[in-house]
Image: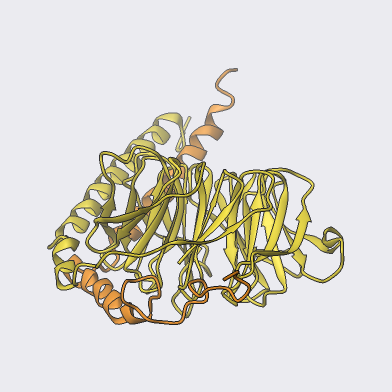
Amino acid sequence: MDRSKQPVQVSSQISKLRKVVEQLRKEANIDRAKVSESGWFLADYCDMCYHKDPLLPGVMTYNPYKEKRSCEIV
Amino acid sequence: MAVTDGPAVKEEEINALTREAESLKIKLEEERRKLNDVDLMVVAEKLDTLPQLNLKPRRILKGHQGKVLCLDWARDHRHMVTSSQDGKIIVWDAFTTNKEHGITMPTTWVMACSYAPSGTIVACGGLDNKCSVYQLSQEEDLSTKKRAVAMHTSYVSCCTFMNSDQQILTGSGDSTCALWDVESGQLLQSFHGHNADVMGLDLSPSEACNTFVSGGCDKQALVWDMRSGQCVQSFDGHESDINAVRFFPSGDAFASASDDAGCRLYDLRADREINCYAKECIIFGATSLDFSLSGRLLFVGYNDYSVNIWDTLKGIRLTMLYGHENRISCLRTSPDGTALCTGSWDYTLRIWA
């Protein structure tokens, strides 16, 4: 009978959907911060690390890739 | 006949579950929207506008005879491993541009490579569906030092060592990620949740390192709990495949690069997208991305051969880097932040500083 496969497919569809619902329930209940707050953390991090970031303008850290190589022909 | 589990009952259950999923999705969106009290650009106003950037090409690494597909820096900030379409892996001294090791893989399209924290092992994988490790030594033929660690049912698209040489995390075209013990090759944890090929992953830089993010062809980015194997947060918004994901250096956010030509910044605390890096004039897919050491700069490689540098917080494009003669396939800031390395389908890698 062409229905012989159906129960298996239906059960796998149900178990998949159950997983999706379970995942969504979990995600719906997590604690969230306001963007004003979480964004401030990111901005603060950038600000705090600015002077350590050699690729930012005005940062004077030693950078071996910017030095002239000793074997360069003068 | 009493049928408790008949087709009608099951159909009802399917309908009920589908309805619940839909209403949960709406609830989730509402919750996320509620906390979107201000635009990130407004928050970013407290930061000064960046002066003109001055990144220049400093080195060109030539040696691959095929498209460069992946690169990874060693922790010494100087060595680098790269893999290519021609089946070769090269270990470079990026400073001198010398090739220190060359390994030939049995298959072409080596899509993933990673440098172990100790600097003595490299891992790679690709169309062979495996992730193999090579012990670096002065011997001529390193292929004898090869050991297969991981096995997927489709290609390995990405791999990265954990904070030690003992464990490696892989992502695959079989839509899963997996954590492996390097020594025994034992599968420690598998991560199921993507509905299509996983294309990129990144470990959280936070000290505990209990989470990682993955992105894939299902347009989703998923954040995982390493120990439980469970997905803890999921983010969508992209209109096409995600090619790469990368954590913001503080570990509180991550960015994704997509074939839809855009990049997005997702904040883990706010549990939502907080910035999008796109322009009407950018129409080619974004393949790769990384942050500068402070997180302020976001480097993105595109299929149109260019690299764009974005102000992560203000969301504006600062400048572009030109030099490559084909698609940018991979890009990585050195661990000490002194240089950016880009790899391309033009067979070369370039170092910018």
Residue at (28% x, 39% y) in the render? B281
- How many marks overall? 0
Residue at (28% x, 72% y) in the render? A42
Q: Is residue B298 visible?
A: yes
Q: Is residue B264 left or right of residue A5?
A: left
Measured along the vertical axis of the image, is residue B185 above or below residue B317?
A: below
Q: Residue furthest top?
A: A1
Residue at (28% x, 47% y) in the render? B278
Task: State the image quarter where residue A41 is shown.
Answer: bottom left
Q: Residue furthest front?
A: A74
Q: Is residue B116 left or right of residue B232?
A: right
Task: State the image quarter where residue B81 is shown.
Answer: bottom right
Q: Which of the two residues, B274 or A11, is positioned nearer the viewer here? A: B274
Apparent colour of chain B? yellow
Measured along the vertical axis of the image, is residue A58 above or below residue B323?
A: below
Spot occupied by residue B323 in the image (x, y as percentages of width and height): 47, 49
Apparent colour of chain A? orange
Spot occupied by residue B60 in the image (x, y as percentages of width and height): 57, 57
Q: Which of the two residues, B225 or A46, is positioned nearer the viewer here? A: A46
Residue at (24% x, 67% y) in the render? B50
Spot occupied by residue A61 in the image (x, y as percentages of width and height): 41, 82
